[in-house]
Image (cartoon, helix red, strand yellow):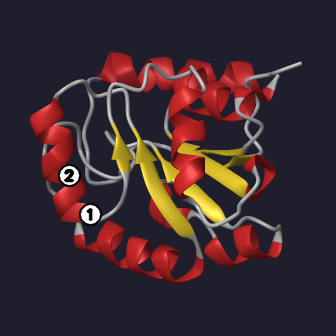
């Protein structure tokens, strides 16, 4: 049975994930959500903190992005910017995009992949449905969201903890 409780619940953004712990836990590949997880939505810009964290992640893991963003031009700009495989218009929590990315990883099983994102109903559920570990993070520290969005995120996290 799939539940919305992530394998790892991080009280911070993507840069607060302990990459060495993931490696120790047998993770060999990382699949990231894009908007709010790696970049501010539709910005096409990466912060220096995220860039440095990603540099270290690339040294330790195979990496890729699965996004629900439907803007093909933006997805291509991000692929060029981050120099990693990316699938847009993924319709998460559907599994197809996770499995498609997995084909490009070097002989890695779904159980050796962690899906990293900021939304339980798309990133966590989709990763779990694909048999992967999941990491739920808060949106980037550099972002500001409307108060109602922040409140909804707090409610989501409350629900998954109970």
Describe residue 42's horizontal placement relative to residue 79 as left or right. left
- Is residue 44 visible to us here? no
Tell me the number on the disc at residue 140: none
Question: How would you rate the neighbour count of disc 1 (Cα within 10 Å): few for under 14, some for 14-19, many for 20 or more?
Answer: some
**Image position, residue 94 (x, y; %):** 57, 20
Q: Which residue is mark 2?
A: 78
Whether residue 152 is visible here, answered yes or no, is: yes
Q: Nearer the viewer, residue 119 or 81?
A: 81
Residue at the image point whose x is 72% and y is 26% from the top: 129
Q: Secondary structure at mark 2?
A: helix
Image coordinates of residue 145 in percent, x first then y, are: 27, 31
Quarter of the N terminus within the rendering? top right
Q: Identify the image quadrant of the C terminus.
A: top right
Q: Residue at x 55, y 32 (%)?
A: 123
Q: Is residue 145 above or below residue 108?
A: above
The Cα atoms of the two marked residues, 2 and 1, are separated by 6 Å
- Which disc, if any, is residue 82? 1
């Amino acid at each position: 049975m799939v539940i919305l409780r992530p394998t790892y619940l991080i009280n911070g953004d993507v840069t607060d994930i302990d990459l060495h712990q993931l490696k120790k836990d047998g993770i060999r590949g990382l699949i990231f959500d894009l908007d709010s997880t790696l970049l501010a939505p539709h910005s096409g810009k990466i912060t220096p903190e995220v860039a440095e964290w990603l540099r270290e992640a690339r040294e330790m893991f195979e990496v890729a992005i699965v996004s629900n963003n439907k803007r093909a031009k933006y997805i291509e700009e991000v692929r060029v910017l981050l120099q990693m495989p990316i699938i847009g218009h993924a319709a998460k929590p559907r599994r197809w995009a996770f499995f498609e990315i997995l084909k490009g990883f070097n002989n890695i099983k779904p159980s050796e992949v962690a899906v990293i994102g900021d939304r339980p109903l798309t990133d966590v559920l989709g990763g779990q449905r694909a048999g992967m570990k999941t990491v739920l993070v808060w949106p980037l520290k550099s972002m500001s969201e409307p108060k109602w969005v922040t409140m909804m995120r707090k409610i989501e996290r409350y629900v998954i903890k109970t």
